[in-house]
Image (spheres, grey):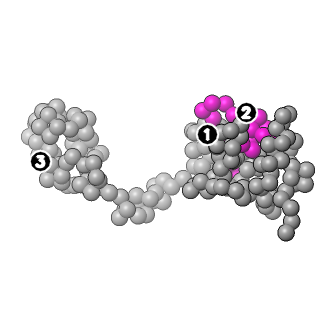
């Protein structure tokens, strides 16, 4: 069996930042270089497949640790985003710093967001819990039909919300068929 890769024997490894060499060497023991240029994190992973590591006594995502070891600090509220779209990759050359919006825009641009006919609610409508099937639902299908009837008779949303003890805005969403759309 070969020895685990070290900072010196992995191709194209950037130098660790000053004061981070020891941490970088320890980090690289859990990295397996792939032919596509990704560095596969071989230690602990989250259920979303992101590597988990620690830096300065704080557990965090391994790709964030990699960025901090080899590139620099990550500002508060910023993400280390993957260019390669592999959550287990920790190659700092495959990472960029951005906001959540930047990350979502990148995902959409690459066609990885499930929208329109690819959205889960369209592909697997049976998996959605609608109406009374939602565990916190205060209304029944019958209540929704009564609410729509009261609205058509001219009763105000405030009066109806007082009657059913729910938010006035929710009555408006029911009225405009933005909520409980599946009920006629």
Is residue 145 toward the left or the right of residue 108 in the image? left
The quadrant in which the C terminus is found is bottom left
N-term mark: 1 or 3: 1
Left or right: 76, with 166 as reference point? right
Is disc 2 placed on a helix, strand or loop?
loop
Give me the C-alpha separation between circle 1 and circle 3. 44 Å
Q: CA distance from mark 2 to mark 3?
A: 57 Å
Q: Nearer the viewer, mark 2 or mark 3?
A: 2
Q: Which of the two residues, 47 or 143, is positioned nearer the viewer here?
A: 47
Q: How many marks?
A: 3
Residue 73 has which mark?
Answer: 2
Q: Which residue is mark 1?
A: 102
* Residue 103 sits in quarter: top right
Q: Quadrant of the N terminus?
A: bottom right
**What span is colored magenta in the figure?**
65-85
Question: What residue is at 65 percent from the left and 50 percent from the top?
Answer: 52
Mark earlier in primary sequence (2, 1): 2
Q: Of tags 2 and 1, which is closer to the observer?
A: 2
Residue named by callout 3: 146
Within 10 angstroms of label 1, few (less than 14), some, or many (20 or more) residues? some
Residue drawn at 69 percent across, 44 percent down: 54
Residue name at image x 91 percent, y 50 percent: 8
Q: CA–CA distance between discs 2 and 1?
A: 18 Å
User: Do the residues under discs 2 and 1 have CB atoms within 8 angstroms?
Assistant: no
* Callout 1: SS: helix
Bin the neighbour count of mark 2 within 10 Å (Cα to Cα): few under 14, some 14-19, many 20 and up. Answer: few
Q: Position of residue 10 (x, y in %)?
A: 87, 54
The residue lying furthest to the front in this view is 57
Can the viewer see residue 96 in this picture? no
The residue shown at (79%, 42%) is: 23
List x then y, in percent, for residue 36. 78, 60
């Amino acid at each position: 069996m070969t020895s685990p890769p070290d900072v010196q024997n992995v191709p194209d490894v950037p130098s660790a930042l000053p004061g981070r060499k020891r941490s970088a060497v320890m980090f690289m023991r859990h990295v397996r270089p792939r032919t596509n240029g990704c560095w596969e994190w071989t230690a602990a992973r989250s259920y979303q497949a992101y590597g988990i590591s620690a830096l300065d006594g704080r557990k965090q995502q391994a790709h964030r640790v990699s960025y901090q070891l080899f590139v620099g600090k990550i500002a508060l509220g910023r993400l280390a985003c993957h260019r390669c779209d592999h959550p287990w990759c920790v190659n700092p050359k495959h990472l960029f710093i951005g906001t959540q919006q930047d990350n979502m825009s990148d995902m959409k641009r690459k066609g990885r967001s499930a929208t329109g006919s690819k959205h889960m609610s369209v592909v697997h409508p049976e998996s959605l819990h609608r109406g009374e099937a939602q565990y916190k639902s205060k209304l029944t299908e019958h209540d929704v039909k009564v609410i729509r009837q009261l609205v058509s008779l001219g009763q105000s949303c405030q009066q109806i919300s007082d009657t059913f003890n729910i938010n006035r805005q929710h009555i408006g969403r029911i009225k405009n068929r933005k909520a409980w759309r599946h009920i006629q």
